[in-house]
Amino acid sequence: MEKTYKFLKEAQTYFLATVEGDQPRVRPFGTANIFEGKLYIQTGNVKPVAKQIAANPKVELCAFKDGVWLRLSGELVEDDRVEAKKAMLDAYPNLRAMYDENDGVTTVYYFKNAKATFESFTAPKEEETF
């Protein structure tokens, strides 16, 4: 998980794919944090992405950096603990202009049954599961 986390932090932006009915939905994200040994992401529960994850927690994300791309697939599990939300917002203090761990809007998820694949045109594929 450490390699995946480091890649996401360095790439800064990744694209998260969900589904809405039979329609794929993709949007940019920028949060990644490790809390209690799990990889977390964050959004607001008023956004369509949160409703899509609630309906189908299977997601995939993709990030690109220095000629290498990462695909991470897995299931997102919501963690409603204040401690998990606070850890994310402490890692991204700029989000505090929009979110607070006690606002009832901040939502954090951790990856379960995750498989990360690192690929490029010039190096062998590498995988990481967690």
Image (cartoon, rainbow, N blue to C red):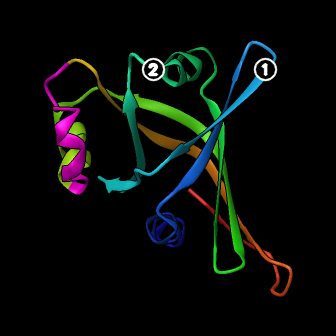
The amino acid beneath tag 1 is Gln
17 left or right, relative to 12: right
Residue under label 2: 47
Please report the residue visible at 41 percent of the width from the left and 28 percent of the height from the top: 78
Q: Nearer the viewer, residue 4 or 122?
A: 122
Identified at 64% across, 80% down, the residue is 66
* Magenta highlight range: 91-103
Image quarter where the C terminus lies is bottom right
Find the distance from the CA under tag 1 to the CA under tag 2.
Answer: 16 Å
Q: Which residue is mark 1?
A: 23
Of the pair 115 and 49, the residue shown nearer to us: 49
Name of the residue lying farthest toward the right: 121
Q: Report which quarter residue 95 is drawn in.
A: top left
Callout 1 secondary element: strand
Crowd rating for badge 1 (residues with CA inside 10 Å; few <14, some 14–19, many 20+): few
What residue do we see at 24% from left, 40% from top? 84
* Magenta-drawn stretch contains 114: no
Give the residue furthest to the bottom: 122
> How far across and how far down the image is residue 77, in percent?
47, 31
